[in-house]
Amino acid sequence: MNRQNNSGAPSLLDEQMMSFLYGMQRIRLAEERIGELVASREVRTPCHLSIGQEAIPVGVCAALNEDDSLWGGHRSHGHYLAKGGDLNAMMAEIFGKATGCARGRGGSMHLVAPAQGIFGTVPLVAATIPLAVGAALSGKLRGTAQVAVAFFGDGATDEGHFHESLNLAALYRLPVVFVCENNLYSTHLTLKERRVKDNIAESAALHGLAGMALDGNDVTAVYRAAHQAVQRARSGEGPTLLECRTYRWRGHVGPAADLGVGADRRRELDEWQRRDPIAQCRALLGAGGVPFDVLDGVTAKAREEIEAAVTFALQSPAPDESELLQHVYAARRGC
């Protein structure tokens, strides 16, 4: 068993660190492959990649139970996979196939896996933050120990939904964790072009809930902060806002790096790539004595799984035309 450290979070043993590495590597390689498929036009759905941000979904979801709910947005491949979503079903969904998690109706931005607590990601900015609050309120009214987690980018903090949700959650001490993946860009606008102050984490104190800013590229820091926040929520102490500082290596949408966006993008990307969350995790494990061939085996295993998922998607059938109007109109019931 893991020992407890002074923060109250479990000490991280090699086995759990290896699971973190595998989870991050799996997300990274899956999204790199998706990027290739988009570039070759084999995939036509718009895909928003989270390459460079993998530590956040892996670290947060490691602190959750299967029946805790997760609410994501347009950049949620990592959330889906980290929470236990089926890789084959995600890849098939991105190809628009009938075996996809939404039977090919949703594409990259509408991922769903109810058995794993993923009730649908939504591309509208900030739209799922209040849904997470609603899920938390439901759990509290039903007397369960379930926690809801909302993942969103820094752009969502400019929306009214964000502030209204924090206020309501704090007022009723709801079991919800707000995870801001602050990658410093909203579409093509930098944080400093949209805000007078770089102070997202301070929104927590203003609304009366716990909050902190942390290194979103350090999977151990993310896990420990999430573990503490989840325990607070589960024990009735109310919500927490985690501002996880990170950077997306690709552009807003698609596989390109968008190096022409803003004056500082190329310099920033070089700096953040030196803080690669996967490389940091590998270095920690290597320094702890894990052989490099074992670490390389993690990459090979993830790559093999991803190629199998692509093959599954390519060989899967397209939805039948008879399904076209399903879930579009309400079924007529008796008078």
Image (cartoon, rainbow, N blue to C red):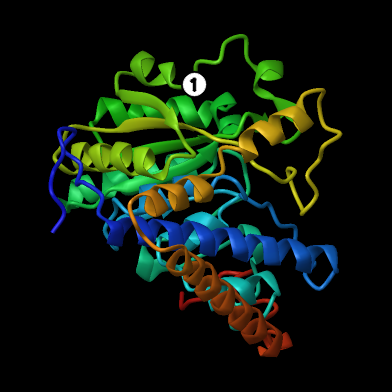
Name the quadrant containing residue 66: bottom left
Task: Identify the residue at horizontal 49%, vertical 61% (top origin).
Answer: 80
* Observer able to see residue 101: no
96 lies left or right of 164: right
| Between 270 and 316, the one nearer to me in the picture | 270
Q: Is residue 261 above or below residue 321?
A: above
Q: Is residue 199 above or below residue 138?
A: above
Name the quadrant containing residue 249: top right
* Observer able to see residue 208: yes
Q: Position of residue 16 (x, y in %)?
A: 30, 58
Q: Position of residue 42 (x, y in %)?
A: 81, 73
**Amino acid identity at mark 1:** Ile
Task: Identify the residue at horizontal 61%, vertical 65% (top origin).
Answer: 30
Task: Identify the residue at horizontal 72%, vertical 46% (top origin).
Answer: 250
Q: Is residue 88 above or below residue 246?
A: below
| Between 17 and 138, the one nearer to me in the picture | 17
Give the secondary structure at mark 1. loop
Residue labelled with disc 1? 200
Answer few, some or many: residues within 10 Å of disc 1's Cα (few below 14, many 20 plus, some between 14 and 19).
some
Task: Identify the residue at horizontal 67%, vertical 16% (top origin).
Answer: 192
